[in-house]
């Protein structure tokens, strides 16, 4: 099964994403965070809400994962 969001194809079975820059297999924590945010698109989510819904898997900074996800989608912004 796939979800499509803002130019991303999210492959739920392989836990990977495809962008204009290629296909990336994400680590479990990053994938879970991305999936949670996509499923809650249009809602304002606090860092605390994100942490509470993903905390069994998130042990690193939510900010760091959001940065990494952004970098994977738009690497040219960070060059």
Image: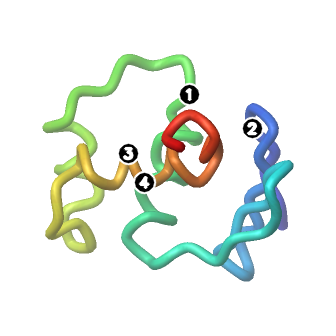
Disc 2, SS:
strand
Residue at 81% x, 44% y is: 4
- Which one is closest to the eye, mark 2 or mark 4? 4
Picture quadrant of residue 59: bottom left
- Mark 1 highlights which residue? 41
Counting residues from the N terminus, which is met first, the one under dot 2 or under dot 4? Answer: 2
Badge 1 crowding class, 10 Å Cα cut-off, few under 14, some 14 to 19, many 20 or more, is few
**Mark number for residue 5?**
2
Question: How far across and down, in percent of the image, does residue 22 sit?
Answer: 82, 63
Question: How far across and down, in percent of the image, does residue 40 sit?
Answer: 50, 33
How far separated are the C-alphas under marks 1 and 4? 18 Å
Counting residues from the N terminus, which is met first, the one under dot 2 or under dot 1? Answer: 2
- Which one is closest to the eye, mark 3 or mark 2? 3
Left or right: 44 as drawn, with respect to 7: left
- Mark 3 highlights which residue? 66
Counting residues from the N terminus, which is met first, the one under dot 3 or under dot 1? Answer: 1
**Mark number for residue 19?**
none
- Which one is closest to the eye, mark 2 or mark 1? 2
* Residue 18 to residue 79: above or below: below
* Residue 22 to residue 44: above or below: below
Q: Are marks 4 and 3 in contact (CB under 8 Å)?
A: yes
Disc 1, SS:
loop
How far separated are the C-alphas under marks 3 and 2? 16 Å
* Residue 28 to residue 73: above or below: below
Question: How far across and down, in percent of the image, does residue 34 sit?
Answer: 50, 52
Picture quadrant of residue 54: bottom left
Badge 2 crowding class, 10 Å Cα cut-off, few under 14, some 14 to 19, many 20 or more, is few
Q: Are marks 2 and 1 in contact (CB under 8 Å)?
A: yes
- Mark 4 highlights which residue? 68
Counting residues from the N terminus, which is met first, the one under dot 3 or under dot 2? Answer: 2
Counting residues from the N terminus, which is met first, the one under dot 1 or under dot 4? Answer: 1
Badge 3 crowding class, 10 Å Cα cut-off, few under 14, some 14 to 19, many 20 or more, is some
């Amino acid at each position: 099964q796939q979800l499509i969001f803002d130019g991303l194809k999210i492959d739920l079975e392989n836990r990977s994403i495809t962008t204009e820059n290629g296909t990336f297999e994400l680590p479990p924590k990053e994938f879970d965070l991305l999936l949670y945010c996509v499923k809650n698109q249009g809602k304002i989510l606090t860092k605390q809400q994100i942490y509470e819904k993903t905390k069994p898997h998130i042990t690193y900074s939510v900010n760091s994962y959001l940065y990494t996800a952004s970098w994977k989608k738009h690497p040219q912004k960070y060059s």
